[in-house]
Image: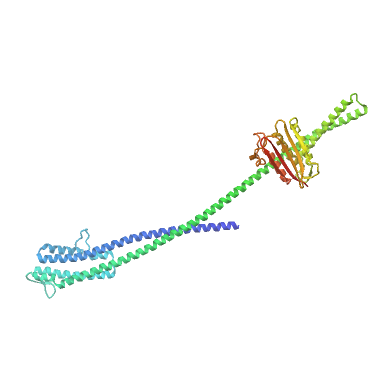
Amino acid sequence: MIEKGIKERMGRLHQMFFILIAGMLALSGCLAFSIFRDASKLRQLESTRYKLFSMGEELKASSENLTNYCRSFVLTRERVWEQKYFDLLDVRNGVKPWPNGHAISLKDSLLKLGISKQEFVKLMFAEDKSNELVATEKRAFNAMRGLFTGSNKQFSIKGAPDTLMARRILFDKSYMAAKKTIMDPIDDFRGMMNNRISAEIKQQEVQNDMLMKLILLTLFSGALLSFYVILVLRKKIIVQLFDLEKSNQELELTLQDLKKTQLKLVKSAKMASLGTLTAGVSHEINNPLNYIMGAYLGLSNYFENYGSQEESITNLLLNSMKAGVDKAAQIVKGLNQFSRDNSRFDEDCDIHSILDNCLIMHASQLKHKTEVKKDYCLEDFVVKGNVGKLHQVFANVLSNAIYALPEQGKICIATRKETQNVKVIITDNGCGIQTEHLSQITDPFFTTKPPGEGAGLGLYITSSIIDKHLGQIEFESTLHAGTKVIITLPIA
């Protein structure tokens, strides 16, 4: 339950990390969009400043052009300058279209671009002064036509054209002062407009710098958080892989245990079947042996009471009969010991008797092929264990030794008593075992025999039985020179 709670908390933490990363990316996108939008606004401000400058120059230039057209008319009396004067005045006032085809007054164009209240005041002041100057210039035009203002300030008085008056109007100090009163507000308007737009541009640039810093900070934080999440996930994946590897190892060990258990069950079933078969065979063999032994005893009593014409031949035949019966009885006894069904390990085991029984069971394989030398210790000792299973141990070892022997081989069986152990040493002069195979010969299913001649279970079962007896088995071998098997068992 604790591990499950930790996993749930880690899952929620990872989910929160991913939400934070997604939020940072979304915030970075919004900030980047703001920067692009502000960049467009900056371009618009620059464009507006350029247009306002251009229109300010146009207003200033138009005022100069009006003065020049008016003066040119007064000096030359050519109607073309008068026409140009009034055409320019109509264009500036929005009566006639500009070269681009739009009919809008210069003041309205400036207002359309957006100007501040102070700038508007300056513009209106300049326009008022410009209108006053236009009125003065119209007086000059009318003086050239012979029209003069009366008491009602209207051009109601007619007379001869007065060129001097017209020139005096356009060239005296008052006209120049009035001209200056127009140019100064226009210059002030341009300066105020330039300062305002420059301040807005600077403010926008500062804001863009702040947005860029926020984007960089967000991206850097997102990168650090992503790196941390990657490290955490990498560690989690490594831990999961480690757990998976550990689970695989545990599963492999479980499979090995299952194989061993299966082998034990198969072996137990085989041994149980062998024990049943051996018990039946022993019973069937013992019956005719009893008949033969009864016949032997009866013949012995008969010849002892009545004698025989060929006593030496009779005794030879009777002794041969007795030896055959005893030999068969020993084989049956060995079979019974080998296949006895007992799972206890507290029996008194006579190692020498067990070895002899195993040699009897392999008598047919040893006959005319192998010399067997027994070197048993004379000291008394008792080994506690399972008699039947120890028969299996020595029968398997002797079977392997016999298989490895040449045509005329030799097997030596020796026992040695130590302080707490007894050693059984079985040596043969057979083909030997390769050094690299010595560590594998007790593994299940490992065999050096050709296919079909061995399953690789004999020494595995032998090693398992010795382990249950708290003993150990060792192998020493030289290829083509023979093998020595040392079995150590504890003394009770």
User: Residue most toward the bottom?
Assistant: 151
Q: Nearer the viewer, residue 369 or 320?
A: 369
For the N terminus, the quadrant is bottom right
Q: Nearer the viewer, residue 164 or 350?
A: 350
Q: How many marks?
A: 0
Q: Quadrant of residue 176?
A: bottom left
Q: Nearer the viewer, residue 447 or 270?
A: 447
The answer to whether residue 389 of the structure is visible from this angle is no
Residue pictured at 61% horizontal, 48% vertical: 249
User: Residue most toward the top?
Assistant: 309
Q: Is residue 276 left or right of residue 76?
A: right
Image position of 193 with respect to 416: above or below: below
> Residue 304 at what x, y percent from top left?
91, 29
Residue pictured at 63% horizontal, 45% vertical: 255
> Residue 165 at what x, y percent from top left?
10, 71
User: Residue most toward the right?
Assistant: 305
Q: Is residue 323 left or right of residue 232?
A: right
Image position of 221 with respect to 307: above or below: below
Coloring basis for residues = rainbow
Q: Quadrant of residue 465?
A: top right
> Residue 279 at what x, y percent from top left?
78, 37
The answer to whether residue 216 of the structure is visible from this angle is yes
Image position of 138 with respect to 441: above or below: below
Residue pictured at 39% horizontal, 63% vertical: 210
> Residue 488 at what x, y percent from top left?
73, 44
